Image: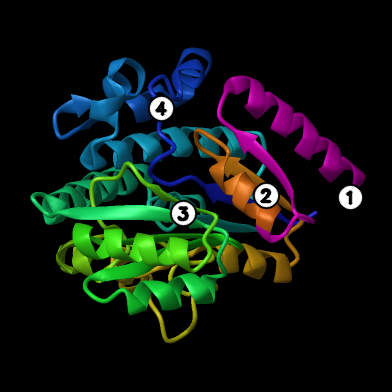
Amino acid sequence: MKLAFLYAGQGSQRVGMGKDFYENFPQIREVFDTPVSGVSIKKLCFEGSLEELSCTSNTQPCMAAFAMAVTKLLKERGITPDYSAGLSLGEYNALYSAGVFDESTLLDLLAFRGKVMHETTAGMESKMYAVLGLSDEEAARVTAEAGGNVWAANFNCPGQVVIGGESKAADRAAELLKEAGAKRVLPLNVSGPFHTPLMKKAGELLGEKFESVHFGNMEIPVVFNTTADILQPSENIAQLLVRQVQSPVLFGKSIERLHTFGVDTAVEIGPGKVLSGFVKKTCPEIKTLSIETVEDFEKVINELKGENHEH
């Protein structure tokens, strides 16, 4: 068996995420007890309103804390991945699972990333749409033809592309995409045009921040969002993370890449099953498991231990 850990991105957050882990596993409580910008992650995750939790500057460290706690518990049980990947902010958790970031660095980085993304988009009239039923190439071509500041931002899986940009340009692209035969074009509830050139300022600020960050050795390969591949000799992680915030996420191609590396089982870590859905549509031969609750966690442990026993 070749195993990949996949980490969910923004949009999957829900109030109460991680609460059952907090109650059942004292060893991960300090992760949730950490304050971020003066507010405890525990309070935001377990007691906050969804609106408060969904503010970009809160979502990112909270999602990271949840995924980090689950990753620690899996490692405690002897389960480590052969590869790792994550969607957008999930990529930082993938790097944590690979030993690149320690806990405090991960939380600090995502609190900072959330803050600069929030500030970059404050006052910006922007929209993002999910486009269903067109190929990647067709969706990108029609979006480019709409003119103005709008781009294809996420290539999630076959038949699902997200576009983003300034509101008027995004609305125009949405109309053209419908005319081009998209089955559905759905507005997304996000606070900015993420993974587009409009996020350049956030990228620059992240670049400055990375100058003072310690990057540990990568213990397992991570498949990156912007390249859909593992780190190449000519690349460094900081550059890829700066690019990631303002460039398209190639998640469908990342799943295909994991498949070419021989991955046959993927565990999605985080609330919801969005990434498992992408895997099923991209490479249905990869078996997907997901961990959102303690019950899920125990099931996954039993299943993976059984698989390892057989191999």
Image location (x, y in percent) of residue 254: 57, 66
Question: Which badge, 4 or 3, comes first in the chain's sequence?
Answer: 4
Q: Which residue is pictured at 43% across the width and 78% down the height?
A: 141
How many angstroms separate mark 4 from mark 2 (CA)? 22 Å
Which mark, residue 87? 3
Question: Which badge, 1 or 2, comes first in the chain's sequence?
Answer: 2
Q: Secondary structure at mark 4?
A: loop
- Give the magenta range: 282-311
Residue that numbered label 4 is attached to: 14
Question: Which badge, 3 or 1, comes first in the chain's sequence?
Answer: 3
* 72 left or right, relative to 276: left
Image location (x, y in percent) of residue 179: 45, 65
Depth check, mark 1 against mark 2: the one in front is 2
Image location (x, y in percent) of residue 102: 38, 48
Tell me if residue 211 can be seen. no
Between 173 and 302, the residue placed more toward the observer is 173
Q: Amino acid at mark 4?
A: Arg
Question: Which badge, 2 or 3, comes first in the chain's sequence?
Answer: 3
Q: Secondary structure at mark 3?
A: loop
